[in-house]
Image (spheres, rainbow, N blue to C red):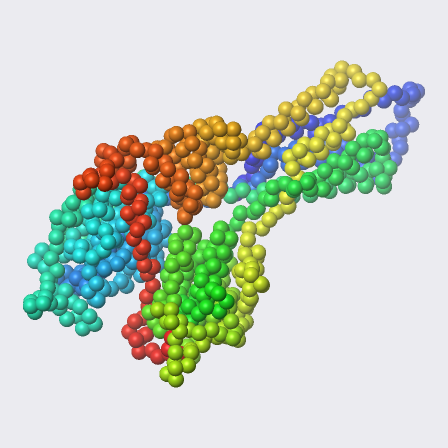
Amino acid sequence: MNFTFTAPYLLWLLPLALLPFIPRRRDSSPLSSLDPLRHLRTTWRLRFYRLHSWCAALTIAMLIILLADPVQRETSRTTVREGVDLMLVLDVSASLGATDIPPSRMVAARNAAADFLSERRNDRVGVILFSGVPILLSPPVLDKGHLITRLRAVEADRSGTGTAIGDALATALARLKDSPAQSKAVILLTDGSSNRGSITPRAAARAAAALGIRIYTIGFGSLQGSEIPLGSTGAPARLADGSLLLSTLEEEPLLEIARLTGGQHFLATSGEALREVYQRIDALEKSPLEVKDRITDLPLAPLLQRLILLLLALELLLFRLWLRIQPTGYLLDLVALTAFSLLLIPPPGGGPILRGEQNGPDLALAIDVSASMACNDNGESRLALAQREARTLITSLPNSRFSLTLIGGEGVVQAPLTEDREAILFFVDRLLPRMVSSPGSAPEEGILTALSTLSSAGRERAVILLSDGERTVPTPAPRLPQSIPVYTIPLGSVAGSPVLQDNGEVLRGRDDATVISSRDDDRLRQIASITKGEMLLRPDSAPATLALIERWRPAELLAPPALWWLWSALGLLLLRQFPWSRKVRGWSAWVPAFTLLTLVISACGHIIERGENDFNIGMRYAKSGAFEEAARAFARAIPSLLANERGLALYNQGTALLQAGNAAPAVTALEQALLLLPGDTAARTNLALALRLLGDHPASGSGDGERQSEESSVDAPMNREQALQLVEAVKPQAFADAASQAEIRERSVEKDW
């Protein structure tokens, strides 16, 4: 941690602080001798008089330093591997339960994949599981600890829903298409051929080529094939004639996928061979490590502003009113009072608000997804209300880390503690009632699971429970620790509302009466009280999380006056300290002119430097129709902006390039903007326009990139726009499951919904 200035060139004005020490020339009557005065006693009044010049000089010096914008800078250095994003697409169909590779194909595949993830510490890696449908286990994230744990617990799907390789690949491409990484790749592991899905593997491979994404394919299994276990008993699958159905590996489609995308195909017939394949892919997808510095500036301007106000008040009160020392006239005292007012009174419209940038708390979101969360109390389902509250909290606290735990009959960790807010938001937006397979609702168990996701680091920690508070499992509620507060947000109404089935119809009991679910405020209030938290009620239509947002939002510091106010105050203080006299002689005659010229030049330069920034310059150019100059200005502004502002600058840059007719760089800028502003309609529209403008221009990774007509052959390269439409057509499921299936199947519930 050190101190620095954002405008250090203004420090050369510091010699102006010596103005109070320049002697003032005054006419005086000659004395015959000064010897009698030497024996006079030095009084405290005389001592204070000598301090007057030092006080004035210090005030001017502090004001110049304030204009130079001092900050306390903290630099944290991290090592990252920039430019590699991977998606691991893992087949979990019934054939993975075969035991020809001991102990089973599934166990060997998941363990090898988990070991591979543990070696890619500095890369963003996501995982997709697929059988008949793709399931997103995790988007590409850096925090892979909990992801590895979940991956090691994956089991084969014995329901026999088939293998949808094309849909799984399209889902992986959809997660990588907006990535700014220099290298993007998919690793597909399967032991069979595709027999399900809306997209063929070949079409998915052509889309990957158009998007510039390589696909590495791994054929896993023995060449002679093996029996396919189905159901809970593991009985082997049979054909209609009663003969055994064997899982055989078809390598030709996998070879074609790798060839079309510039990847490679590998064959692994054992667990050890699979690990060697992953090591080879790991070597192919390496990039140099980079050291990145994260700089956090804490402005010191508010502290200096208070100090300057104190020095001015001291000078006016002590030297003028109390001691009645008169080094200047009353007119110049009025000048000093005006400068004091400029520093004290905020200008019309206020100056920019400076925010301190510190680490926020670690927050564990525990969201109830039991059947009662589908209830519609006030025109909106309880789960939809929980999603809105969670999204508001996540987007309002940029310096916090979040985890996500789902609550059913037990707690299931959906996402570990991470700074990747986009990954958390992805899962929050896809929550569904009954998403946890264990029946019932157990809020306390869910809280304990959420607590396990919080680290013991120095940050503040808390659990946010969004639930209707009902407990429907007969077991006694476990005791909650008091070390971490739990803030409960009641959902639903005390009067209750009908419970809905999956088909949307009202659930009825044995006596044909409508089943009603009511909010349990007593339980939620008790949970908050035991853990020293708080139950947060929704004030009118405002979010219940508003109190937490205000508490944990980065602190707002005192807004310094606008630059013109500061420069005006400095000019007045220097005017007051000029060595005014009846007779101006020698070099002192040039002091006022030199000072005035210095102030004008410095003030103009400072205002242009800090007021007219590159983003504003780009806006001005864009409004005047100078789109190429606007794009260059936005490009200069991008490195110094935060994520959301950087997304806006990238969007503006891409739009300006599009208006200037430069479609190719516009596509790059708009794609990067979409990564920071996911779902932005305007950015997607402009990207589509830029892609259309490319016309016959080559597309990244698509061979010759020629635009093909509807009648073109299936082997023709796919353009980028067609690839985006293809991959966005597949909607994956969000992964959620129970952590202890054997125990849950034996558990009963008091209210069966």
Where is residue 675, by image quadrant?
Answer: top left
Whether residue 447 is visible: no
Residue 61 lies, in percent from the top left, at 68, 33
Looking at the image, which residue is at 20% across and 40% down? 711
Looking at the picture, tell me which residue is in the foreground, 17 or 672.
Answer: 672
Residue 184 lies, in percent from the top left, at 29, 43
In this rendering, position of residue 292 left or right of residue 202: right
Pick out the residue farthest to the top: 586
Looking at the image, which residue is at 42% across and 32% down? 659
In the figure, 465 relative to 609: above or below?
A: below
In the figure, 361 relative to 709: above or below?
A: below
Looking at the image, which residue is at 82% across and 22% down? 581
Pick out the residue farthest to the front: 711
Residue 722 lies, in percent from the top left, at 28, 42
Whether residue 572 is visible: yes
Picture quarter with the C terminus: bottom left
In the figure, 627 relative to 311: above or below?
A: above
Q: How many marks?
A: 0
In this rendering, position of residue 8 left or right of residue 710: right
In the figure, 161 relative to 299: above or below?
A: below
Residue 429 lies, in percent from the top left, at 41, 57
Looking at the image, which residue is at 72% across and 42% down? 344
